Amino acid sequence: MKRRLISWLKSFFFWELFQGLRVTGRYFFARKFTIRFPEERTPKSPRYRGLHALRRYPNGEERCIACKLCEAVCPALAITIDSEEREDGTRRTTRYDIDLFKCVYCGFCEEACPVDAVVLTRFHDFHFEERGQQVIRKLDLLKLGDRFEEEIATDRQTESKYR
């Protein structure tokens, strides 16, 4: 009988509502921790996996030797590679496409590469405005690698500490 009376009084005076408002009021007057995106950036781990890039050797030659290990290991089948043999007997890619809609950013391609040619950068501010832009071609990947080479090299040095 006593429990029912307490339950009735709590429902009559909207006890649950006041408990909820108390929690709301506590957070309403607390210091905000919202990050204002374009001006402020969230800290990222050096092992964050963002947009792909193809790297070059210091002499300017592309690193990819067209072994196609990254294409074979990709669980989403997002990488397409065509290659041909050059006059000096080495193989190089003629086509290296990554479909970013298919990609799950797992990093398997990066781990499988024997010459450290394909990497996932920390760059995440990319978007697409037209159909077909989600497929990044070889020249664009090489440009991204040139643009972020310094950042990639420092990430490689810090990452070697964790391996």
Image (cartoon, grey):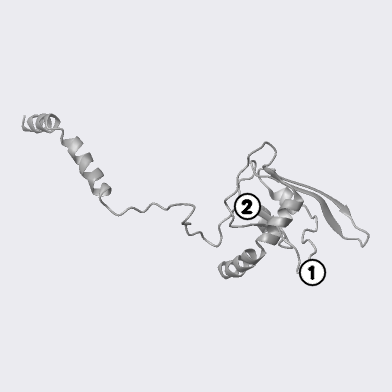
The spot of residue 105 in percent (x, y) is 61, 49
Q: Is residue 116 visible?
A: yes
- The residue to which callout 1 is attached is 59
Residue farthest front in this picture = 39
Under mark 2, the amino acid is: Leu
Observer-nearest of 27 and 84: 27
Which image quarter is the C terminus in? bottom right
Residue drawn 23% across the image and 45% down it: 25
Q: Left or right: where does residue 108 sit relative to residue 86?
A: left
The spot of residue 68 in percent (x, y) is 77, 52
Q: Are marks 2 and 1 in contact (CB under 8 Å)?
A: no
- The residue to which callout 2 is attached is 51
Q: Is residue 112 visible?
A: no
Categorize mark 2 by other alpha carbons within 10 Å: few (<14), some (14-19), many (20+): some
Observer-nearest of 94 and 39: 39
* Residue 91 to residue 19: above or below: below
Q: Secondary structure at mark 2?
A: loop
Q: Left or right: where does residue 44 sit relative to residue 132?
A: left
The spot of residue 161 in percent (x, y) is 57, 70
The spot of residue 95 in percent (x, y) is 80, 48
Which image quarter is the N terminus in? top left
Mark closer to the chain start, 2 or 1? 2
* Residue 82 to residue 9: above or below: below
Residue drawn 66% across the image and 37% down it: 130
Under mark 1, the amino acid is: Asn
Q: Secondary structure at mark 1?
A: loop
* Residue 9 to residue 31: above or below: above
Q: Left or right: where does residue 145 sit relative to residue 3?
A: right
